[in-house]
């Protein structure tokens, strides 16, 4: 553990889902900064009813969490709670994650003239409602003192939405080693038989993640003895299950829902498939690389920043035939799969270490805090 000579007080703000890349990044950042001697408070906007798994994970890691109540159309109360928190702890920096916290915590920090940093994790596209949210997020981020982009694609998105180039920091996600279950234990937990060949699909069941494309690809592999396990929840689940039945895939696709600590279960799979239409820097790729699992992924957003053809099978989005071909080769050409997974692991260890990533966040926070102090004198 290292201790910085100048202790910062940092509020990280987000409205967490049950699990996901944004939540993993925030947990790694908060726990890493705390280990360096900084005071870190995570303002988590959650429903008051019951406990939230994200909050529980942070508290087990020793990170202070301040739950902020979330209720339909209770935005003023949410903003007021965030402003009171900021007034009480007097942070050096407020760092937001996700469009809701960019807006609500960003406004609360702006009212107290606290320097603001946001991480632009990715965008969803899709329907008019999501596009409105993204437009609003872009306008909000123009007012932030700094915005961290997790991929070059996000840098370009931020520029298109009017964020000044000098305020954008390209800082790709990092990977911290975590415990992995043995293959037999992971399969036992997920109810997978020892001899089955299994593809894993992990993520939100939402349009931008392309689970429908994955189902189309599975339907193109009737001769391949392989099952699919889908780890994740989302609004599309019922429709996707019905589509799997319609395509004759009911016995070949299992819907496991939200699995706690999904990353530890990746050794259960013979391959991981990412079929997204858009991405930031997906943490599941880094987790699969760490687990030594062959990867078949669409080359969208920040995915080509993380892996290249020597590390994985990269295919175009919206191309189930290409995705199916990648899955077939991945599962049948074992020497090629072994070479690519080994190269991916070496690439992960050399390029995505946590400590340099934390160094860059610290440096950014210190620069902004110093500028704020100079401006107030």
Image (tube, grey):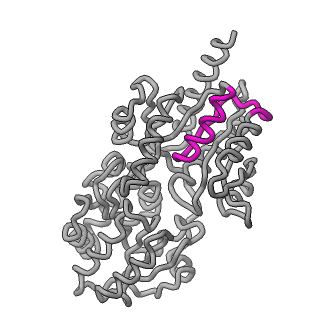
In front: 146, or 9?
Answer: 146
- The spot of residue 55 in percent (x, y) is 69, 57
**Image height of 122 relative to 271, above or below:** above
- The spot of residue 25 in percent (x, y) is 55, 49
The C terminus sits in image quarter: top right
- Residue in the picture at 39% in, 30% down: 162
How many callouts does the rendering have? 0
Quarter of the image where one finds residue 354: top right
Q: Is residue 280 visible?
A: no
Residue at the farthest right position: 88
- Residue in the picture at 52% in, 85% down: 191
The boundaries of the magenta stretch are 87-112
- Residue in the picture at 34% in, 65% down: 210
- The spot of residue 288 in percent (x, y) is 43, 62
**Image height of 75 relative to 273, above or below:** above
- Residue in the picture at 26% in, 68% down: 335
User: Does residue 101 show up magenta in the picture?
Assistant: yes
**Image height of 233 relative to 347, above or below:** below
Residue at the farthest top position: 377
The N terminus sits in image quarter: top right
In front: 80, or 248?
Answer: 80
Q: Is residue 298 left or right of residue 347?
A: left
User: Does residue 261 show up magenta in the picture?
Assistant: no
Q: Main secondary structure of the magenta part?
A: helix
Q: Is residue 224 left or right of residue 9?
A: left
Quarter of the image where one finds residue 171: top left
- The spot of residue 52 in percent (x, y) is 68, 62
Q: Is residue 369 visible?
A: yes
């Amino acid at each position: 553990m290292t201790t910085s000579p100048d202790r910062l007080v940092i509020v990280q703000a987000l409205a967490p889902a049950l699990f996901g890349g944004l939540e993993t990044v925030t947990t790694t950042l908060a726990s890493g900064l705390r280990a360096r001697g900084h005071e870190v408070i995570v303002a988590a906007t959650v429903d008051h009813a019951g406990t939230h798994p994200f909050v529980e994970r942070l508290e087990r890691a020793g990170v202070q969490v301040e739950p902020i109540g979330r209720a339909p159309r209770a935005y003023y109360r949410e903003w007021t709670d965030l402003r009171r928190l900021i007034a009480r702890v007097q942070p050096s920096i407020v760092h937001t994650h996700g469009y809701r916290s960019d807006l609500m915590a960003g406004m609360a920090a702006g009212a107290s003239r606290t320097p603001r940093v946001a991480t632009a994790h990715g965008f969803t596209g899709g329907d008019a409602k999501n596009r409105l949210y993204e437009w609003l997020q872009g306008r909000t981020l123009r007012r932030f003192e700094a915005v961290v982009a997790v991929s070059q694609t996000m840098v370009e998105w931020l520029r298109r939405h009017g964020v000044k180039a000098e305020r954008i920091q390209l800082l790709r996600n990092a990977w911290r080693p975590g415990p992995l279950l043995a293959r037999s234990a992971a399969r036992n937990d997920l109810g997978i038989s020892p001899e089955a060949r299994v593809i894993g699909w992990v993520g939100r069941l939402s349009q931008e993640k392309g689970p429908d494309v994955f189902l189309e690809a599975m339907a193109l592999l009737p001769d391949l003895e392989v099952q699919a396990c889908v780890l994740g929840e989302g609004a599309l689940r019922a429709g996707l299950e019905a589509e799997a039945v319609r395509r004759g895939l009911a016995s070949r696709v299992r819907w496991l829902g939200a699995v706690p600590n999904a990353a530890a279960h990746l050794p259960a799979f013979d391959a991981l498939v990412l079929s997204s239409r858009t991405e930031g820097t997906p943490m599941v790729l880094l987790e699969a690389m760490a687990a030594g699992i062959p990867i078949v992924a669409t080359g969208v957003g920040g995915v080509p920043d993380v892996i290249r053809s020597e590390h994985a099978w990269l295919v175009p989005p919206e191309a189930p035939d290409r995705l199916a071909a990648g899955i077939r080769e991945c599962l049948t050409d074992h020497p090629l799969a072994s070479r690519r997974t080994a190269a991916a692991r070496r690439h992960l260890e050399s390029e995505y270490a946590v400590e340099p990533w934390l160094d860059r966040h610290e440096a950014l926070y210190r620069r902004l805090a110093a500028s704020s102090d100079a401006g107030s004198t």
